[in-house]
Amino acid sequence: MKKVKVPIGKLGEWKVERFPVTRKAAVWMNLRNAFNPQRGDRSIEPGIYTRLVRNRNTLVMSDTPAEMRDAAYFIREARGHVLINGLGLGAVLNEVMVKEEVKSINVVEISEELIQLVGKHFQNGKVDIVHANAFHYNPREYMRTKGIEKFDWVWHDIWDSFSEDFKPQVHKLNRRYAHWCHNQDNWMSKGLPSMMR
């Protein structure tokens, strides 16, 4: 999986920054994660990564291998017409937009500042980014303009962290988009059997 090429920058409450993971830090993180099998494969290699931070210290997303593995199933299966709820750092979009079998991508992002900071780096003929709330967005107009009856895939990725407290939100999104798509998934379900399927 490719690292994102979004330049470092700041806009409002959002900041894109690079961060190093030293060999020593990678060993420590991998050892700690080995003793917590419920988290799945969170291993990391030393290197320079990119992260998206909100309000100075809330890590929203990074392009580390662990985060990319959370979306690996969706990235592998995505094809046809795709809707992504949540732009974040654009790491998932970065992978999906280069797939030949993906014809169009409708990204729904609630933060206009994040669209300005990150979204502008993912403009191509396949990608349309909409400023909207995933819980209220109605994709019918977009679908009409694209001539599609249903999205082939919908990906929900609007949460900063994993929590059982988000389970009702996941179910609400799944119900809301069920009649607009053939398949849908979310980043919290991969490798987390107690979570929402």
Image (tube, rainbow, N blue to C red):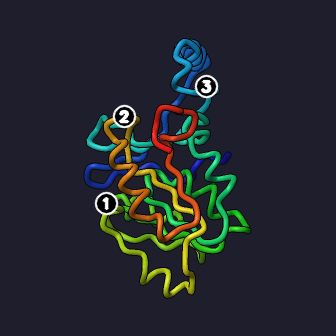
Q: Name the residue under label 3.
A: 43
- Label 3, secondary structure: give it: loop
Kindly identify which residue carries mark 2.
163
> Disc 1 designates what residue?
111
Where residue 195 appears, x then y in whole percent? 46, 36
Amino acid beneath label 3: Ser
Indicate the secondary structure of the residue bearing disc 2: loop
Residue 105 percent location from the top left of the image: 55, 69
Q: In which quarter of the image is the N terminus?
A: top right
Q: Please indicate whether residue 37 sits to the left or right of residue 59 in the image.
A: right
Q: Is residue 46 above or below residue 90?
A: above
Give coordinates of residue 154: x percent, y percent: 52, 61
**SS assignment at label 1:** loop
Q: Residue at horizontal 53%, vertical 52%?
A: 185
Residue 136 marker? none
Q: Is residue 52 visible?
A: yes
Is residue 123 visible to us here? no
The residue shown at (37%, 42%) is 167
Cα distance in 3D space between marks 3 and 1 = 30 Å
Seen in the picture, residue 121 relative to 167 is either above or below; the reply is: below
